[in-house]
Image: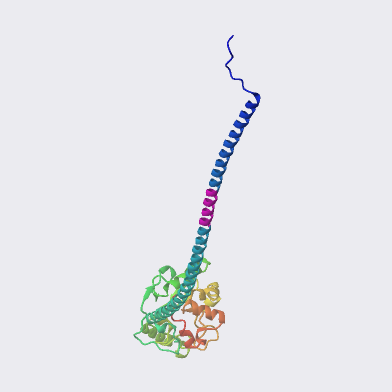
Amino acid sequence: MEKNTHHTIHPKEDGHATSYIITIILLITSIVLAILYASAASEEKKLRQTLTQKEAAVIAQQEQAQLETMALQTTISNLESDRNTLAEKLEEEEDRNDDFEDQIEKISGTVTVLDKLAKTDDELLRKYSKVSFLNENYVPKTLTNIAKKYLVSESKPLQFHGDAYDHLEDLLDEADDDGMDMRVTSAFRSFGTQSTLKANYNVIYGAGTANQFSAEQGFSEHQLGTAADFTTPALVGAVDAFANTPEYEWLLDNAHKYGFILSYPQGNTYYQFEPWHWRFVGKDLARYLDRKDTTFYELDQRTIDEYLVDLFD
């Protein structure tokens, strides 16, 4: 019989081995855990450091931003101050320019007025009719033939002051539009023509009577070229009857709108009432006389002269 050589493990010894193994495992686990903990702690420390650095960087950036903002605010404030200063200077300069422009405008206006006065015949608003005298050589600067359709006799050509002719046309055209049958029977008359006419009247009517309705040569408004005698075809030569026509009433209501005035109304101290005789004195003066319900010869000459610059406007 062979002898059994197998070693028999005693249960107690087996328990010690297991405990030993477990202890080793626990030890290893502890070591691993310790290593992991240390690694985690190290990572956490690194993360905290990184976070702290980033927070510090953010804080630094915020502080830098605040500094830059303050610097920008200071710059903006300075710019606003500079802008306000420049705005004030600009406003002052604009005020100076406005003052300068006003001065230029006044000077230009004065030059314009003086130029217009220099080009406008100062005789045109003078009082004649036994007051002022026109010499035998006086003739308006420009004379225009009155269109035949406006004449009571197409065979007798008449002339009117060239600068005032448009106003005469406007008056006659408007009268025609309103149903008036009005014509011109006399307009510009030279010194010589007036002299001949007055001589004929003296022969026909006598000097005393003629002086009541006809001016001496040199004193006639017709020599200015701005006076016209109106009539209607129906009246032919009966000019005295013109006062009883609707055309005369139309002139009383409308002539001033076109710059014409009745030179010798009823009650004037120069000539007998002449409803046919109308003189161009400019719209401004004619309208002024209409508003004031006064007549040309009742005004002071200095007041009349103020309207000379705008005579043909």
At horizontal 56% and vertical 79% (from top left) the residue drawn is 291
Q: Quadrant of the C terminus?
A: bottom left
The percent position of residue 87, horizontal first and vertical second, equals 47, 72
Q: Is residue 10 above or below residue 287?
A: above
Please, which colouring scheme is shown?
A: rainbow
Examine the rendered structure and indicate whether residue 253 appears above or below residue 136.
above
Q: Is residue 69 above or below residue 39?
A: below
Q: Would you say the magenta stretch is mainly helix, strand or loop?
A: helix
Q: How many marks?
A: 0
Residue 181 can be seen, yes or no: no
Q: Residue furthest top?
A: 1
Q: Quadrant of the N terminus?
A: top right
**Looking at the image, residue 68 lies above or below residue 132:** above
Q: Is residue 69 magenta?
A: no
Of residues 12 and 227, the one nearer the viewer is 12
Q: Nearer the viewer, residue 40 or 10?
A: 10
Residue 7 percent location from the top left of the image:
59, 20
Q: Is residue 150 visible?
A: yes
Question: In the orientation shown, which residue stands out farthest toward the left?
Answer: 137
In the image, farthest residue toward the right? 12
How far across and down, in percent of the image, does residue 118 sit? 37, 82
Relative depth, front residue between 87 and 129 = 87
Q: Which residues are magenta?
A: 45-58
Q: Position of residue 132 (x, y in %)?
A: 43, 89
